[in-house]
Image (spheres, rainbow, N blue to C red):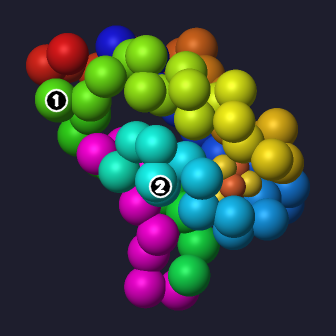
Amino acid sequence: MKKPVIDLGECSLCDICVALCPEVFIKNSAGYIEVAECLAGASESDIIDAINSCRGDCISWDETTETEGV
Ligand code: SF4
């Protein structure tokens, strides 16, 4: 499964991605959004929902990354 990446420079920390797909999008202790290391159990359609709902339009697919387990 491809992995999403976040352009933190455009991220407004609105938390929509965390609300829609908490298995993948995590707010770290510094207050920034990061993508979980392991995407096992994540739903691609939930990730797509988050991409489409992102206010900053700052989530995209990392085409260079393939993860296993999904
Ligand atoms: S939905 Fe987009 S703008 Fe909002 S916290 Fe997630 S990455 Fe940032």
70 left or right, relative to 8: left
Looking at the picture, which amino acid does disc 2 mark? Val
The Cα atoms of the two marked residues, 1 and 2, are separated by 15 Å
Q: Position of residue 16 (x, y in %)?
A: 60, 53
* Image quadrant assignment for residue 41: top left
Quadrant of the image occupied by residue 33? bottom right
Residue 3 in magenta? no
Residue contact between numbered discs 1 and 2, judged by CB atoms under 8 Å:
no
Q: Residue 34, how many percent across, how many down? A: 49, 58
The residue wearing badge 2 is 18
Residue type at mark 1: give it: Gly
Q: Is residue 26 above or below residue 3?
A: below
Q: Residue at x 58, y 35 (%)?
A: 50
Q: Residue at x 23, y 40 (%)?
A: 38
Task: Determine if the magenta segment contains residue 26.
Answer: yes
Q: Position of residue 31 (x, y in %)?
A: 56, 81
The quadrant in which the N terminus is found is: top left
Q: Which residue is mark 1?
A: 41
Q: Residues within 10 Å of mark 1 (few under 14, many from 20)?
A: few
Residue 57 % position (x, y): 82, 38
Q: Is residue 8 visible?
A: no
Give the answer, above or below, for where 31 lies relative to 49. Answer: below
Is residue 12 among the parts visible in the rendering? yes
Q: Is mark 2 within 8 Å of ligand 1?
A: yes
Is residue 47 found left or right of 53 in the rendered image? left
Circle 2 Cα neighbour tier, 10 Å, few/some/many (<14 / 14–19 / ≥20): some
Q: State which region is magenta.
A: 23-30
Residue at the farthest bottom position: 30
Q: Considering depth in this image, is 16 or 5 the residue closer to the camera?
A: 16
Q: Main secondary structure of the magenta part?
A: loop
Q: Residue at image x 58%, y 14%?
A: 63
Q: Looking at the rendered structure, which numbered label has been put on residue 23?
A: none
